[in-house]
Image: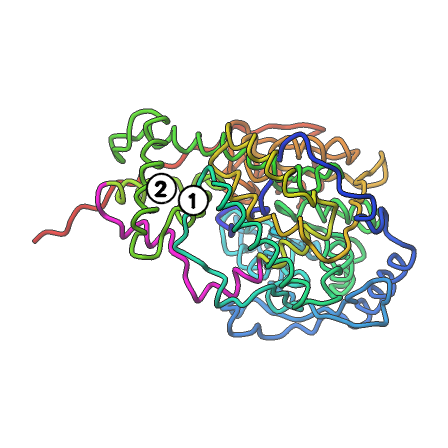
Amino acid sequence: MRTTAAVHVAVGSVLLTTWAAAPASAGTHAAPSAAELRGTAVAAARAADRGIDFGACPAEQQLPGTVRCGTVRVPLDYARPNGKQIRLTVSRSRATGKDPDNSKRKVRRQGSLVHNPGGPGASGMYFPMMGALPEWKRIAAAYDLVGYAPRGVGRSAPLSCTDPGTFFKGPSKAPVHPSEAYKRKRVARAKAYARGCAERAGDALRHYNSLNNARDLDVVRAALGENRLTFLGSSYGTYFGALYATLFPSHVRRMVFDAAVDPDPKQIWYRNNLDQSAAFEHRWTDFLAWVARHDDTYGLGGTAREVRAGYAEARARLAKNPAGGKVGPEQLQAAMLQAGYYDDVWPHHARALSAYLKGDAAPLVELAQEYPEAAAEAENARAVYLAVECNDAPWPTDWAVWDRDNTRLARRAPFETWANVWTNLPCAYWKAPRQQPLDVRAGRGELPPTLILAAERDAAAPYHGALELHRRLAGSTLVTERDAGSHGIAGGPNACVNRHLEAYLLEGRVPGRHASCAAHAQPKPQPQPRPAAA
């Protein structure tokens, strides 16, 4: 869920084919109002006048001294720009101006590169630190690296739906094929969570949505003193980045969409979540097959089927006797889901599963346990995730629709399907009014060239989403990492991808409408540590 060498964060969860439409009254508006457009212009003008007073970052952020922090004021409701204001926290490291290959040669500064890592609910405050990595040094020489916490996240008008002290409920079972009694319990929990969001946030809840995230981005641009925006959005960040390009095409300088989610209004968000669950099954099988190829290291079987059986055995054991009293099947599944996002975690996760099945639970407990000190951040991230996705679009409000669609899907994609349902189910009982998603579009000549990066087997943002975004944004270029599945590939281990990224950000060059890169090498197995000598 967090950033690795590549800049990426998981989108929540995502989709199938049939669902009952929400009632027409669920959508409050299909397009931004004139008042909201005027309000955004007013807020951006004020931000341009104020700028950002950058200073030392809060100690709890644990950012190095080279990173400076400040705040940007935005309206809670853009239709009322003179009404309640909230503050977004922003971080920045200045362009180094130094060519990493020749320290004596200076590099021309090209302005600010603003990043959003996704979620919804993820903070970009740590993005400026990426400039220290070799893959980012050329970009960091030319750009100020700017991150920020979107509305609701962290210190940016934080949103909460429940007491963080009760957020982690482990160890818990979360069966792959739940009983009717278990489903009733989870429906009740979803209703309570939706009710908690409404009670804690009040009328403000409706203003946490993707269109406001796009408007906030334009205010941040203005506060940074940029006439046009250079932006890198990962995962969910590609969606409100695409909204930004639709709303403010003349404000775009360069935009990178990394791990693009499908922006088709019919997909936002229920169907996207069904598609995601289906894609995770394929990606989970990729991991199992990799473990099987390294049976000499992990001893979990020589076929994906045998490794899958070992995972099922681990779930059964944990249901009866949680590891360390902390890790049950739900915690195991949440931990192993990361193998569906990033293949650089495969060795560590395979080792933990292998050790547990051979009698050593310690690596699995370390990997999968819920840490109380992280509960507040986790609860905040989930609250923002749900507020944005539930507000963005109509959702089925009849549990029978969810039950039907996901029961069908779980027959062929059991790994993530029901876990995904339980994450998103509060949207069925949401108290705030719903929007109708904006139709993302850019005709020929309306935008400068934009760059879309996608891994062909990405499960969190299935590849068809990148194809759809490419189709909708005229003049865009799609770079595909073939036969690869890590979620977010910008600035990661693939040198071919990074060459395209640098050529675009540093020189404005794109390789035509389509380009492809071979997958980077898969990770090497990580052997079990040998017992210490007596």
Q: Could you classify mark 2 by the number of other residues whose Cα lies within 10 Å: few (under 14), some (14-19), or many (20 or more)?
A: many
Relative depth, front residue between 270 and 517: 270
User: Can the viewer see residue 362 in this picture?
Assistant: yes
Give how far across and how far down residue 76 sits, in percent: 77, 66
Relative depth, front residue between 271 and 233: 271
User: Can the viewer see residue 232 in this picture?
Assistant: no
Q: Cβ–Cβ below 8 Å for labels 2 and 1?
A: yes
Relative depth, front residue between 90 and 187: 187
Give how far across and how far down residue 477 sits, in percent: 70, 33
Say what amino acid the circle numbered 2 marks: Arg
State the residue lying farthest toward the left: 534
Q: CA distance from mark 2 to mark 1?
A: 8 Å
Say what amino acid the circle numbered 1 marks: Gln
Any mark on residue 305, and which?
A: none
Q: Secondary structure at mark 1?
A: helix
Any mark on residue 333, and which?
A: 1
- Please tell me whether residue 409 is drawn above or below residue 133 in the rendered image: above
State whether the magenta stretch is mostly helix, strand or loop. helix
- Side (left or right) of 180 relative to 112: left
- Which residue is located at x 26 percent, y 43 percent? 355
Q: Magenta region: which residues?
A: 358-381
Q: What residue is disc 2 on?
A: 315
- Please tell me whether residue 480 is drawn above or below residue 97 in the rendered image: above
- Which residue is located at x 83 percent, y 69 percent? 46
